[in-house]
Image: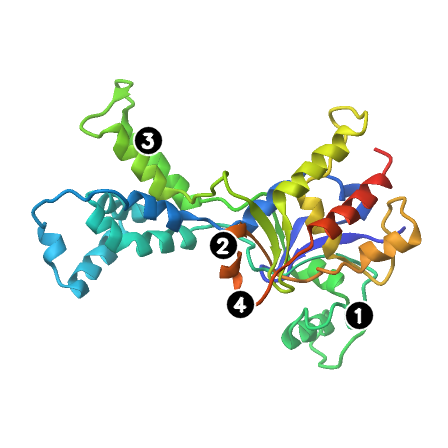
Amino acid sequence: MGQYWQILDLDAREVIGGHGDKLGVFFWSSDYDDLLGSLKLSASDERFDTLLGGIIAEQASPLLQRLQVEIFDLVVDDVTDVDDGLWLLFLAITCKAILARVRGRILAWQQEHRKDTRRGHRLICVGDYAETATLPPRMLSAEELLEIAQLGGEDPELDASNTLFSYAYERYRSGSPRPWRFMRQKSAREHIQEMRYDHAEGCPRAPWAAADFVLLDALVMPWFPQDRPWVLCNVSKREYVRERDAEELCVKLACARDSDEFAPVPSLWHFLLAYICWSDDYSVAIALNRELAEELTQGRWAGDRFARTLLDRIEEQGEGPWTDVTKEASAFVEKLWSACSY
């Protein structure tokens, strides 16, 4: 029957996008492109710096600002719990001085309600022929290895026939390849829109100014600047791929073929997938020579941790030097794409 594969988030204990299929069936699918959104680091702190820049008008210090720090924090605690944090945002836009004092709370609120994030998680596309003993070293904890060994019973003796694939099939929940959703932030945005318009009359509601809603929206949602280079990072091995270069290669490869509009196309996702596949068997249901198939099924990044960040902020991912592997990764993706008959 051939080998089946599953994309796993080991930390979330999720099978992403379904419980197994031939690798060749879904490898070039675009269904997983959005998964990369869950790896992206927001630069909202920079947006806050921009909002707090410029001139702060002189004004009489409000009573709230004159409270002792401990009492002020208690007030903020209370408003944070009202309407899913909406009143915290109202408080923040009253003046820059208060925004400066609660910016950390708002950033924490954004992070708390960030749903389905996979940033920093261990990711692997594992085949059902992959034996537990030959998985990448130190990928699984001792507790996880014991759970796999005891699959189907409480006998503490190790059962080598149990695999990560079978364990995930039985015990992991199904996870969507779609990116995280700001569930409660989205709710906050809907509240804001409801305040902005009088639905009965279909007209703007006073006395809110348009600038207030722009500012509220800036506080609700994370920020991903598009005018600076982003990188896909392997945080475990401290290697990265320049996203712009990867995307340019994908466009080049897709345009080089006279395919119909529904044909698969390579994307940044394939730079990740090509490096996280793992099995002891090189059967992939893709027309690859053995050397290329073995390189694919012994992925150099299998089970590692990942994030997407701005290149100029990559050092925030921990100490130590980083290696740019864009050229190597691009060459590998190009070889895989060239072997396909789409």
Query: Which residue is disc 2 drawn over?
Result: 313
Q: Could you tell which of marks 4 and 2 lies nearer the N-terminus?
A: 2
Q: Which of marks 4 and 1 is nearer the N terminus?
A: 1
Observer-side mark, 4 or 3, equals 4
> Where residue 85 appears, x then y in whole percent?
30, 48
The residue under label 1 is: 134
Looking at the image, which is closer to me, 172 or 132? 132
**Amino acid under label 1?**
Thr
* Crowding near the residue tagged with mark 3, few <14, some 14–19, many ≥20 C-alpha atoms within 10 Å: some
**Which residue is pictured at 81% across the width and 25% down the height?**
258
Q: Badge 2, how many Cα within 10 Å: few under 14, some, many 20+?
A: few
Q: Nearer the viewer, residue 120 or 114?
A: 120
Image position, residue 273 (x, y; %): 71, 50
Q: What residue type is labelled 3?
A: Gln
| Secondary element type, mark 2 | helix
Above or below residue 90? Residue 276 is below
Residue 327, how many percent across, how many down?
Answer: 72, 49
C-alpha separation, residue under disc 1 versus residue under disc 3 = 54 Å
Question: Are the residues flagged by discs 1 and 3 in contact, CB closer than 8 Å?
Answer: no
Q: Circle 4 is placed at which residue position?
A: 319
State which quadrant residue 257 falls in. Answer: top right
| 330 with respect to 185 (left or right) | right
Circle 4: residue type? Glu
Farthest bottom residue? 157
Q: Residues within 10 Å of mark 1 (few under 14, many from 20)?
A: few
Q: In which quadrant is the C terminus drawn? A: top right
The residue carrying pointer 4 sits among few (fewer than 14), some (14 to 19) or many (20 or more) residues within 10 Å by Cα, namely: few
